[in-house]
Image: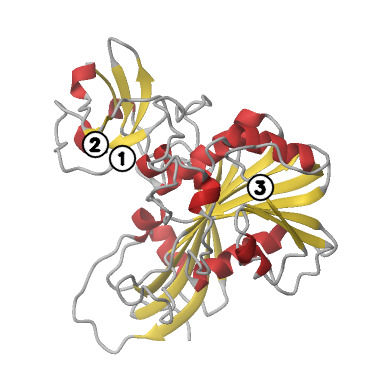
Amino acid sequence: MEIKQDSLATLGFELTWTSAVARHREFYFAEQINFWRDLFPGEVYQALMGKKIGNQVDLIFPAGEITRPYESKQIFTLHPRQFERHRVKGCTVEPRYGRFYPKGLLKGLSNIFSNNLEPFRCIGVEPEYVTVDLNHPLAIKENELQITVYDVTQKETDRGGRLTDWTEVITSGPGMQARSNGRSTDFFSDCPFVRADEQSDSLFYEKPRLVTHIDSKAQEIIRGLYGEVLRPGMKVLDLMSSWRSHVPGSLKLASLVGLGLNKEEMEDNPQLTGYIIHDLNSDPRLPFDDHSFDAVICTVSVEYMARPFHVFSDVARLLKPGGYFINTFSNRWFPPKVISIWEELNDFERMGLVLEYYLQSGRYDNLETYSARGWSRPVTDRHYPEILTADPVFAVRGQTAK
């Protein structure tokens, strides 16, 4: 069956673009797209007509075509009092260079109200003024869009429903992980690495937690991401390891060593060939020789690193030339142990934070970010049907110089 004007379809949108320091990919899985009611740019609509299951469409959008065009009049220089410094968890929100904030914090601008959550970017902070950019972060970027057709059905009737602008959906968030004007984003003022619970991590993780912290679809996506770069015969370190490593089961690695805090969890991990008990937040120096591993993976744990600059630098030391360091995470965490900056950020800004860890170390090349959203939550998941979409997956990876 082919896509027609009265079709319903399931599509995968992959948006790719580049910044000055990295390549970026966003994948959005969209079900029940209604071609009679929903909105696409005309070029996308026409390209999809007649396509069948398994077909792909590849399009390139010059800057300002898939988002609203960049406009200089969307940049404002404001008095510092026009930035509402409200308090979050007892702390005053201060404007910081490159960070995103909800527009509702701005005062004295037309058509902006206090409940407006749409993000803007701070691009200048001085004692006398604050400069803000209300343009979409992708407005100045060329974007490649690949669309894959997963399913096509004929709808029996159309009784109304929600109209969805799919380009707005897939571009909501992407772009926020990149630097502004090539300058480092100021994530590191205001004590970003403090945690609600500063007791020893060894005590907090003393009791085993034999549960997965993301749903099975998110785990599948992470296995796929690791499978993109891991190869048979590699020596791999699972950093901040637990009872599951999310490495493709068919992959015949030379070794997969776990480094974590709970012996019982790692002993229950069927993929590990060995493990070491080590507290990174107490001692970020990794207990391995230089160039010991082909790759290092860190799954849903980077948000707990209280000394990330030391860790990222030392991971580069133990990687072989051209070795990969891959961090994957979602939007769930243990509140007592997560670093404070993590909870302040948008999902896509968190990729920008992790990207800064790589950049600050100065030890990595070929940096990439990846995000995957929109998949249906498996009906077997304990949070179904309260949450209908799968946990989103975010990833940042880099390679040491060859």
User: Residue 317: image x %, image y %?
Assistant: 77, 37
Q: Position of residue 380 (x, y in %)?
A: 43, 81
What numbered label is drawn on residue 278?
Answer: 3
- Labels 3, 2: front one: 3
Report helix, strand or loop for mark 3: loop
Query: Which sits earlier in the primary sequence, circle 1 or circle 2?
Result: 2
User: Callout 1: 10 Å neighbours few (<14), some, many (20+)?
Assistant: many
Give the secondary structure at mark 2. Answer: helix
The answer to which of marks 3 and 2 sits earlier in the sequence is 2
**Residue placed at 37% from the left, 44% from the top?**
343
Examine the rendering and report whether any part of residue 143 can be seen.
Answer: no
Q: Which residue is the extreme one toward the top?
A: 128
**Residue at x-position 14% and y-position 25%:** 108
Q: What amino acid does circle 3 point to?
A: His
Colour scheme used in the picture? secondary structure
Q: Residue at x 37, y 50 (%)?
A: 172
Residue 353, relative to residue 216: is it above or below? above
Can you say whether 5 is above or below 209 in the image?
below
Horizontal side, residue 317 vs residue 224: left or right:
right
Q: Amino acid at mark 1?
A: Pro
Q: Are marks 1 and 2 in contact (CB under 8 Å)?
A: yes
Tell me the amino acid under the disc marked 2.
Lys
Q: How many marks?
A: 3
Query: Residue 98: x percent and y percent?
Result: 42, 29
Disc 1: which residue: 119
Q: Do residues under tags 3 and 2 come within 8 Å of each other at their CB atoms? A: no
